[in-house]
Image (cartoon, helix red, strand yellow):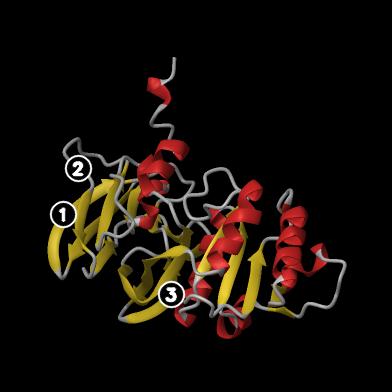
Amino acid sequence: MQGSFKRIGLVGRSKQSGLREVVQELLALLEARDLEVVLEDRLGELVEDASHPLASCDEIGQEADLVIVVGGDGSLLSAARTLAKYDTPVLGVNRGRLGFLTDIVPNEIAIQVPAVLDGHFKPENRFLLDAQVERQGKVVGRADALNDVVVNSGTSAQMIEFELYINDSFVYRQRADGLIVSTPTGSTAYSLSGGGPIMHPTLDAIVLVPMFPHALSSRPIVVEGNSEIRVEILARNRIHPPVTCDGQVNMTARPGDAVHVHKKAHRLTLLHPLGHSFYASCRDKLRWGDALVN
Protein backbone atom coordinates (compact mmCIF):
# COMPACT_ATOMS: atom_id res chain seq x y z
CA MET A 1 0.00 0.00 0.00
CA GLN A 2 3.02 2.31 0.34
CA GLY A 3 2.62 5.48 -1.67
CA SER A 4 -0.84 4.52 -2.89
CA PHE A 5 -2.88 6.83 -0.66
CA LYS A 6 -4.06 9.67 -2.90
CA ARG A 7 -7.70 10.12 -1.85
CA ILE A 8 -8.37 10.16 1.89
CA GLY A 9 -11.77 9.90 3.54
CA LEU A 10 -12.45 11.40 6.98
CA VAL A 11 -15.27 9.73 8.90
CA GLY A 12 -16.68 10.36 12.38
CA ARG A 13 -19.49 11.60 14.56
CA SER A 14 -19.77 15.38 14.58
CA LYS A 15 -21.23 15.65 18.10
CA GLN A 16 -18.17 14.32 19.94
CA SER A 17 -16.33 16.72 22.21
CA GLY A 18 -13.02 17.95 20.83
CA LEU A 19 -13.62 16.50 17.39
CA ARG A 20 -13.49 19.84 15.56
CA GLU A 21 -9.85 20.45 16.58
CA VAL A 22 -8.77 16.95 15.54
CA VAL A 23 -10.50 17.21 12.16
CA GLN A 24 -8.92 20.62 11.51
CA GLU A 25 -5.45 19.27 12.35
CA LEU A 26 -5.92 16.27 10.07
CA LEU A 27 -7.14 18.48 7.22
CA ALA A 28 -4.13 20.77 7.53
CA LEU A 29 -1.78 17.78 7.55
CA LEU A 30 -3.41 16.15 4.51
CA GLU A 31 -3.64 19.40 2.55
CA ALA A 32 0.07 20.04 3.14
CA ARG A 33 0.72 16.78 1.31
CA ASP A 34 -1.56 17.76 -1.59
CA LEU A 35 -3.85 14.81 -0.90
CA GLU A 36 -7.49 14.83 -1.96
CA VAL A 37 -9.79 14.73 1.05
CA VAL A 38 -13.44 13.70 1.20
CA LEU A 39 -15.41 14.39 4.39
CA GLU A 40 -18.27 12.28 5.62
CA ASP A 41 -21.35 14.47 5.28
CA ARG A 42 -22.03 14.66 9.00
CA LEU A 43 -18.57 16.17 9.57
CA GLY A 44 -19.32 19.06 7.23
CA GLU A 45 -20.58 21.27 10.06
CA LEU A 46 -17.16 21.13 11.73
CA VAL A 47 -15.32 22.65 8.76
CA GLU A 48 -15.69 26.30 7.80
CA ASP A 49 -13.85 25.80 4.50
CA ALA A 50 -16.37 24.34 2.05
CA SER A 51 -13.73 23.32 -0.50
CA HIS A 52 -13.75 19.66 0.53
CA PRO A 53 -16.47 17.45 -0.98
CA LEU A 54 -18.95 15.76 1.32
CA ALA A 55 -20.09 12.16 0.84
CA SER A 56 -21.77 9.30 2.67
CA CYS A 57 -19.68 6.62 4.34
CA ASP A 58 -20.70 4.23 1.53
CA GLU A 59 -19.51 6.66 -1.13
CA ILE A 60 -16.25 7.24 0.71
CA GLY A 61 -15.69 3.49 0.94
CA GLN A 62 -16.04 3.20 -2.82
CA GLU A 63 -13.79 6.15 -3.70
CA ALA A 64 -11.10 6.52 -1.01
CA ASP A 65 -7.71 4.80 -0.83
CA LEU A 66 -7.66 5.20 2.94
CA VAL A 67 -10.30 6.12 5.51
CA ILE A 68 -9.34 7.85 8.76
CA VAL A 69 -12.01 7.37 11.42
CA VAL A 70 -11.96 10.04 14.13
CA GLY A 71 -13.64 9.26 17.43
CA GLY A 72 -13.94 6.37 19.83
CA ASP A 73 -14.30 2.70 19.08
CA GLY A 74 -18.04 3.24 18.59
CA SER A 75 -17.32 5.48 15.62
CA LEU A 76 -15.03 2.88 14.11
CA LEU A 77 -17.51 0.06 14.68
CA SER A 78 -20.17 2.01 12.84
CA ALA A 79 -17.85 2.81 9.94
CA ALA A 80 -16.38 -0.70 9.78
CA ARG A 81 -19.70 -2.35 9.01
CA THR A 82 -19.97 -0.13 5.93
CA LEU A 83 -16.35 -0.01 4.81
CA ALA A 84 -15.44 -3.71 5.07
CA LYS A 85 -17.25 -4.64 1.87
CA TYR A 86 -15.16 -2.13 -0.11
CA ASP A 87 -11.83 -3.47 1.19
CA THR A 88 -10.85 0.09 2.09
CA PRO A 89 -8.10 0.24 4.75
CA VAL A 90 -9.01 2.09 7.94
CA LEU A 91 -6.89 4.10 10.36
CA GLY A 92 -8.35 5.10 13.73
CA VAL A 93 -7.70 8.33 15.65
CA ASN A 94 -8.98 8.00 19.20
CA ARG A 95 -11.33 10.48 20.87
CA GLY A 96 -13.05 7.89 23.06
CA ARG A 97 -12.29 6.34 26.44
CA LEU A 98 -10.82 2.93 25.59
CA GLY A 99 -9.67 3.00 22.00
CA PHE A 100 -8.81 -0.64 21.33
CA LEU A 101 -9.54 0.01 17.64
CA THR A 102 -8.67 3.70 17.31
CA ASP A 103 -5.11 3.66 18.61
CA ILE A 104 -3.64 7.05 17.54
CA VAL A 105 -4.20 9.65 20.25
CA PRO A 106 -4.55 13.35 19.29
CA ASN A 107 -1.10 14.41 20.52
CA GLU A 108 0.51 11.80 18.22
CA ILE A 109 -1.32 12.80 15.02
CA ALA A 110 1.55 14.92 13.69
CA ILE A 111 3.97 11.98 13.98
CA GLN A 112 1.90 8.83 13.46
CA VAL A 113 -0.39 9.85 10.59
CA PRO A 114 2.43 11.03 8.25
CA ALA A 115 4.31 7.80 9.01
CA VAL A 116 1.29 5.74 7.96
CA LEU A 117 0.86 7.83 4.81
CA ASP A 118 4.51 7.11 3.99
CA GLY A 119 3.83 3.39 4.21
CA HIS A 120 5.13 2.74 7.72
CA PHE A 121 2.29 0.72 9.25
CA LYS A 122 1.19 -2.76 10.20
CA PRO A 123 -2.01 -4.01 8.48
CA GLU A 124 -4.34 -6.30 10.39
CA ASN A 125 -7.41 -8.12 9.08
CA ARG A 126 -10.48 -8.45 11.30
CA PHE A 127 -13.50 -10.56 10.42
CA LEU A 128 -17.11 -9.53 10.97
CA LEU A 129 -20.22 -11.52 11.80
CA ASP A 130 -23.45 -11.72 9.84
CA ALA A 131 -26.63 -12.12 11.91
CA GLN A 132 -30.04 -13.12 10.55
CA VAL A 133 -33.35 -13.48 12.33
CA GLU A 134 -35.38 -16.25 10.69
CA ARG A 135 -39.12 -16.67 11.22
CA GLN A 136 -40.98 -19.65 9.80
CA GLY A 137 -38.25 -20.22 7.24
CA LYS A 138 -38.03 -16.56 6.12
CA VAL A 139 -35.34 -14.00 6.98
CA VAL A 140 -37.05 -11.05 8.70
CA GLY A 141 -33.94 -9.17 9.82
CA ARG A 142 -30.27 -9.00 8.93
CA ALA A 143 -27.30 -7.02 10.26
CA ASP A 144 -23.57 -7.41 10.75
CA ALA A 145 -21.13 -6.81 13.57
CA LEU A 146 -17.42 -6.29 14.09
CA ASN A 147 -17.59 -6.86 17.84
CA ASP A 148 -20.54 -9.00 18.76
CA VAL A 149 -24.07 -10.21 18.21
CA VAL A 150 -26.12 -10.30 21.41
CA VAL A 151 -29.41 -12.14 21.91
CA ASN A 152 -30.87 -10.91 25.18
CA SER A 153 -34.04 -10.48 27.18
CA GLY A 154 -33.99 -6.70 26.91
CA THR A 155 -35.06 -4.58 29.87
CA SER A 156 -37.69 -7.00 31.16
CA ALA A 157 -35.47 -8.47 33.93
CA GLN A 158 -36.57 -11.91 32.80
CA MET A 159 -34.61 -14.86 31.51
CA ILE A 160 -35.14 -16.29 28.07
CA GLU A 161 -34.94 -19.95 27.17
CA PHE A 162 -33.09 -20.93 24.04
CA GLU A 163 -31.28 -23.79 22.37
CA LEU A 164 -27.78 -23.44 20.92
CA TYR A 165 -26.62 -25.31 17.83
CA ILE A 166 -23.14 -25.20 16.29
CA ASN A 167 -22.83 -26.56 12.74
CA ASP A 168 -26.30 -28.10 13.25
CA SER A 169 -25.08 -30.04 16.30
CA PHE A 170 -27.10 -29.50 19.46
CA VAL A 171 -24.99 -27.94 22.22
CA TYR A 172 -27.38 -27.15 25.08
CA ARG A 173 -30.71 -25.74 26.19
CA GLN A 174 -30.20 -22.71 28.36
CA ARG A 175 -32.13 -20.34 30.59
CA ALA A 176 -30.23 -17.06 30.85
CA ASP A 177 -30.43 -13.32 30.30
CA GLY A 178 -29.06 -14.01 26.83
CA LEU A 179 -26.04 -15.04 24.80
CA ILE A 180 -23.10 -13.00 23.46
CA VAL A 181 -21.56 -14.21 20.19
CA SER A 182 -18.26 -12.37 19.87
CA THR A 183 -15.38 -12.05 17.44
CA PRO A 184 -11.80 -11.77 18.76
CA THR A 185 -12.13 -8.02 18.16
CA GLY A 186 -15.13 -7.94 20.49
CA SER A 187 -13.49 -10.07 23.17
CA THR A 188 -12.25 -6.93 24.94
CA ALA A 189 -15.72 -5.34 24.83
CA TYR A 190 -19.10 -6.60 26.10
CA SER A 191 -17.93 -10.22 26.05
CA LEU A 192 -15.19 -9.36 28.55
CA SER A 193 -17.75 -7.78 30.89
CA GLY A 194 -19.76 -11.01 30.69
CA GLY A 195 -16.81 -13.14 31.79
CA GLY A 196 -15.53 -14.13 28.35
CA PRO A 197 -11.84 -14.67 27.55
CA ILE A 198 -9.56 -12.11 25.92
CA MET A 199 -8.63 -13.37 22.44
CA HIS A 200 -5.85 -12.05 20.26
CA PRO A 201 -7.50 -10.18 17.34
CA THR A 202 -5.79 -12.35 14.70
CA LEU A 203 -7.37 -15.58 15.97
CA ASP A 204 -9.86 -17.33 13.68
CA ALA A 205 -12.34 -18.10 16.43
CA ILE A 206 -15.69 -17.09 17.90
CA VAL A 207 -16.57 -17.05 21.59
CA LEU A 208 -20.07 -17.68 22.95
CA VAL A 209 -20.69 -16.17 26.38
CA PRO A 210 -23.90 -16.92 28.32
CA MET A 211 -25.29 -13.89 30.16
CA PHE A 212 -26.18 -14.68 33.78
CA PRO A 213 -27.03 -18.33 33.03
CA HIS A 214 -29.25 -20.29 35.41
CA ALA A 215 -26.58 -22.99 35.72
CA LEU A 216 -23.29 -22.80 37.59
CA SER A 217 -21.66 -25.12 35.05
CA SER A 218 -22.42 -22.89 32.05
CA ARG A 219 -19.21 -21.29 30.81
CA PRO A 220 -18.00 -19.47 27.67
CA ILE A 221 -17.19 -21.66 24.67
CA VAL A 222 -14.60 -20.83 22.00
CA VAL A 223 -15.33 -22.36 18.58
CA GLU A 224 -13.71 -22.35 15.15
CA GLY A 225 -14.22 -19.13 13.20
CA ASN A 226 -16.15 -20.69 10.31
CA SER A 227 -18.74 -22.23 12.61
CA GLU A 228 -22.42 -21.81 11.80
CA ILE A 229 -24.18 -20.76 14.99
CA ARG A 230 -27.93 -21.03 15.51
CA VAL A 231 -29.82 -19.78 18.55
CA GLU A 232 -33.42 -21.00 18.67
CA ILE A 233 -35.76 -18.93 20.82
CA LEU A 234 -38.13 -21.45 22.34
CA ALA A 235 -41.80 -20.89 21.55
CA ARG A 236 -42.83 -20.88 25.21
CA ASN A 237 -40.95 -17.63 25.87
CA ARG A 238 -43.24 -14.71 26.72
CA ILE A 239 -40.96 -11.88 25.62
CA HIS A 240 -39.58 -10.77 22.27
CA PRO A 241 -35.81 -10.76 22.73
CA PRO A 242 -33.77 -8.02 21.05
CA VAL A 243 -30.87 -9.05 18.81
CA THR A 244 -28.18 -6.35 18.91
CA CYS A 245 -25.12 -5.96 16.68
CA ASP A 246 -22.20 -3.99 18.16
CA GLY A 247 -24.68 -2.36 20.55
CA GLN A 248 -25.74 -0.11 17.66
CA VAL A 249 -28.06 -2.05 15.34
CA ASN A 250 -31.17 -3.65 16.81
CA MET A 251 -33.53 -6.32 15.54
CA THR A 252 -36.35 -8.01 17.44
CA ALA A 253 -36.91 -11.76 17.56
CA ARG A 254 -40.12 -13.51 18.58
CA PRO A 255 -40.69 -16.78 20.39
CA GLY A 256 -40.13 -19.55 17.86
CA ASP A 257 -37.59 -17.54 15.81
CA ALA A 258 -34.03 -18.62 15.10
CA VAL A 259 -30.99 -16.35 15.08
CA HIS A 260 -28.27 -17.46 12.65
CA VAL A 261 -24.72 -16.11 13.05
CA HIS A 262 -21.71 -16.79 10.84
CA LYS A 263 -18.56 -15.11 9.58
CA LYS A 264 -18.92 -12.58 6.77
CA ALA A 265 -16.93 -12.97 3.57
CA HIS A 266 -15.61 -9.40 3.72
CA ARG A 267 -12.95 -8.44 6.25
CA LEU A 268 -11.93 -5.10 7.68
CA THR A 269 -8.31 -4.01 7.14
CA LEU A 270 -7.07 -1.96 10.09
CA LEU A 271 -3.80 -0.06 9.83
CA HIS A 272 -1.72 0.30 12.98
CA PRO A 273 1.35 2.51 13.44
CA LEU A 274 4.61 0.57 13.62
CA GLY A 275 5.28 -0.52 17.16
CA HIS A 276 1.61 -1.15 17.91
CA SER A 277 1.11 -4.00 20.39
CA PHE A 278 -2.19 -5.61 21.35
CA TYR A 279 -0.71 -6.56 24.71
CA ALA A 280 0.47 -3.00 25.33
CA SER A 281 -3.09 -1.84 24.60
CA CYS A 282 -4.41 -4.35 27.13
CA ARG A 283 -1.91 -3.15 29.75
CA ASP A 284 -2.95 0.43 29.13
CA LYS A 285 -6.70 0.11 28.64
CA LEU A 286 -7.36 -2.70 31.12
CA ARG A 287 -4.82 -1.44 33.67
CA TRP A 288 -2.99 -4.75 33.89
CA GLY A 289 0.04 -3.06 35.43
CA ASP A 290 -1.76 -1.23 38.25
CA ALA A 291 -0.77 -3.86 40.82
CA LEU A 292 2.89 -3.20 40.01
CA VAL A 293 2.67 0.50 40.83
CA ASN A 294 3.48 1.55 44.40
Residue bearing mark 3: 142
Residue type at the position of mark 3: Arg
- Residue 168 lies, with reference to residue 282, above or below; the image says below
> What's the CA distance linking mark 1 and mark 3?
24 Å
Task: Specify whether 31 is left or right of 180.
Answer: right
Residue 218: which disc? 2
Mark 2 or mark 1: whose residue is earlier in sequence: 1
Task: Specify whether 78 is left or right of 52.
Answer: left
Q: Secondary structure at mark 3?
A: strand
Q: Secondary structure at mark 2?
A: loop
The foreground one among 122 and 208 is: 122
Residue 267 image position (x, y, % from top left): 39, 73
Residue 278 image position (x, y, % from top left): 38, 49
Q: Are marks 2 and 1 in contact (CB under 8 Å)?
A: yes
Mark 3 or mark 2: whose residue is earlier in sequence: 3
Q: Nearer the viewer, mark 2 or mark 1?
A: 2
Residue 22 image position (x, y, % from top left): 72, 55
Residue type at the position of mark 2: Ser
Residue bearing mark 1: 172
Q: Is residue 280 visible?
A: yes
The foreground one among 155 and 227 is: 227
What crowding class fits label 2: few (fewer than 14 Cα within 10 Å), some (14-19), or many (20 or more)? some
- Residue 158 lies, with reference to residue 121, above or below; the image says above
